[in-house]
Amino acid sequence: MLGRRSVLGRLGVRALGRRLVGLLRAAVALGCVTLIGSFLWLRSAEARLGETLVGFGDELSRWTAAHPQSGPRAMTINGLELRFMTLTTKLSVAGALDHFQQNCRGGLHAPALAGKLEMTLLAGVFRQGTERQGVLACLDTGGVLEVTELAERLTRMQESGNLNDLGKLRYVLARRSGNTTTLLVLWTEGDARLFNLLPKSGDAPGHDLRDWPRPPGVRRLLSAAEHGQPYAMTLYDAEHQSARELEVWYEQALSKAGWSVTRTQGGLLARGGERSVLLHVKTSSSSGKTVITAAELS
């Protein structure tokens, strides 16, 4: 096995720092993508305190300083399975994030890097926040790693594309309103294959909404669905069609397929049988691309 100095020599302090920063930024990006998919369900979340809580969700439920608003729920985003739940607490944003940071079992034992990398990076944590809002992402590796073990895990993850070979993602978004802080907590359990999560070309992994028309020439960016629930959401982008052109296309295609379509302040609302889908189409003034959001509400 390589010694600590030889690994540092092979990777280099700066290279290792860049890889740590990249991984933590990827964790934050993954959390942000997940937020897009999960906001729909957070609005209609009900207390499910009678549910059986397992794993990391069980740890959250025993945190006496916070009150679960829902039990752990499962969702899939671009083929990646995640768990999420919401909690409320009287703690400040900083106090709530402190709790999660203290309970993230990870970090790197590398005295040679002290003073050359931020301490939060050596702890395997990315954190930003104000008094009103904050975010924390960390990789729970089960304990502090030696440099040699980190190098081995990074190599395995690079070969497999599986984040689980390095550790488990923990992501917390905290927002303060009045005297209450609301927390959205996301985490991975088991395999988390990342290489195809956000492809540079072609459709992202996942599925379109069932029996939902799709305009020609669009690319799927996001496919999100909660397990055991009717809620789902799909995002597309279109480079050559305007928002108005796409709305007209959808009105005609949906009516032909038997959906009833009405215009709302948020876009188009399509109803078919017991299903309701909210469609929002917007063209970016900067990129010129049009983004289509189709959210199944029931």
Image: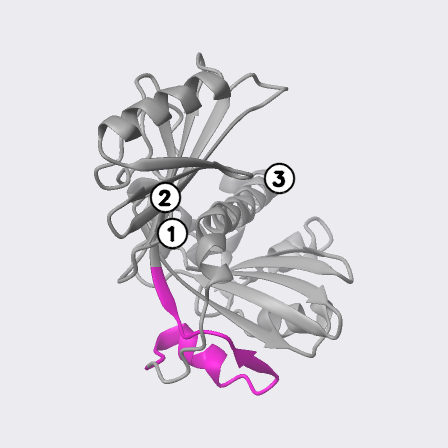
Question: Is residue 281 shown in magenta?
Answer: no
Direction from residue 114 to residue 21 in the image, left or right = left
Residue appearing at x 54%, y 42% in the figure: 22
Question: Is residue 56 shown in magenta?
Answer: yes
Tell me where residue 204 appears, x and y as whole percent.
33, 34
Residue appearing at x 24%, y 26% in the figure: 256
Which circle's residue, 2 or 1, is located before the other in the chain? 2
Which residue in the structure is indicated by mark 3?
14
SS at mark 3?
Answer: helix
What is the CA distance from the residue labelled 2 to the residue labelled 3?
A: 48 Å
The residue segment tinted magenta is 52-74
Against 80, residue 97 (above or below) is below
Figure colour scheme: one colour
Task: Answer whether residue 6 is visible to the viewer in this image.
Answer: no
Tell me where residue 111 appears, x and y as whole percent.
64, 60
Residue appearing at x 75%, y 70% in the figure: 178
Which residue in the structure is indicated by mark 1?
297
Which circle's residue, 2 or 3, is located before the other in the chain? 3
Tell me where residue 229 appears, x and y as whole percent.
30, 60
- Mark 2 touches mark 1? (CB < 8 Å): yes
Q: Amino acid at mark 3?
A: Arg
Q: Amino acid at mark 1?
A: Leu
Dot label at residue 130: none
- Mark 3 touches mark 1? (CB < 8 Å): no
Q: Residues within 10 Å of mark 1 (few under 14, many from 20)?
A: some
Query: Of 44 and 88, which appears nearest the observer?
Result: 44
SS at mark 2?
Answer: strand
